[in-house]
């Protein structure tokens, strides 16, 4: 990716979040389309709005905890990803402010407090490509 000033990216990230909330996709298991997606496809949609084709996310890689293009961080910032691992599955969301995560559920896109995820095994990931 070309060097883009962080202030410009911040505006693009906020615009991406607003656009998703205005016209959210519907849930569809194992889908990675703009209008229908699961949580990994949702992350793919949100990040592609900002980074274009420079961003790719593979559900298989996330399932195997291979975070290519990401670094794990201890203090999450706006637009970082929260990765939640349970015994049977993983779940992804985008941090949209100090207290909330935007994520895809089987009921559609939700914005919920980050605190509901913190009692589970989770990691915070920052896109660095």
Image (tube, rainbow, N blue to C red):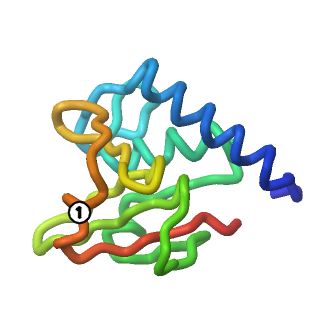
Q: Is residue 37 left or right of residue 19?
A: left
Which residue is at the front of the view, 35 or 10? 10
**Residue 42 location (% of width, % of height):** 41, 42
The residue singled out by tag 1 in the image is: 117
**Residue 65 location (% of width, % of height):** 37, 76
Residue at x 54% of width, y 62% of height: 77
Answer with the quarter of the image where residue 27 lies: top left
Which residue sits furthest left?
Answer: 87
Which residue sits furthest top?
Answer: 23
Residue at x 81% of width, y 57% of height: 1
Figure check: 82 above or below 24: below
How many numbered marks does the figure carry?
Answer: 1
Which residue is at the front of the view, 10 or 20? 10
Figure check: 61 above or below 7: below
Figure check: 13 above or below 70: above
**Mark 1 Cα-neighbour bin, 10 Å: few <14, some 14–19, many ≥20:** some
Which residue is at the front of the view, 65 or 81? 81
Q: Is residue 111 left or right of residue 47?
A: left
Residue at x 34% of width, y 56% of height: 92
**Residue 75 location (% of width, % of height):** 49, 75
Q: Is residue 98 left or right of residue 114?
A: right
Q: Is residue 11 left or right of residue 92?
A: right
Assign a secondary structure to mark 1: loop
Residue at x 47% of width, y 29% of height: 20
**Residue 4 location (% of width, % of height):** 85, 53
| On-image quarter of the C terminus | bottom right
């Amino acid at each position: 990716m070309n060097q883009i000033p962080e202030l410009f990216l911040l505006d693009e990230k906020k615009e991406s979040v607003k656009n998703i909330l205005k016209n959210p996709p519907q849930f569809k298991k194992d889908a990675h389309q703009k209008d229908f997606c699961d949580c990994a496809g949702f992350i793919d949609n949100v990040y592609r709005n900002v980074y274009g084709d420079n961003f790719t996310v593979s559900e298989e890689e996330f399932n195997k905890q291979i975070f290519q293009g990401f670094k794990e961080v201890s203090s999450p910032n706006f637009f970082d990803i929260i990765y939640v691992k349970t015994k049977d599955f993983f779940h992804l969301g985008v941090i949209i402010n100090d207290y909330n995560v935007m994520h895809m559920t089987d009921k559609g896109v939700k914005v919920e407090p980050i605190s509901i995820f913190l009692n589970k095994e989770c990691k915070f990931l920052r896109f660095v490509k």
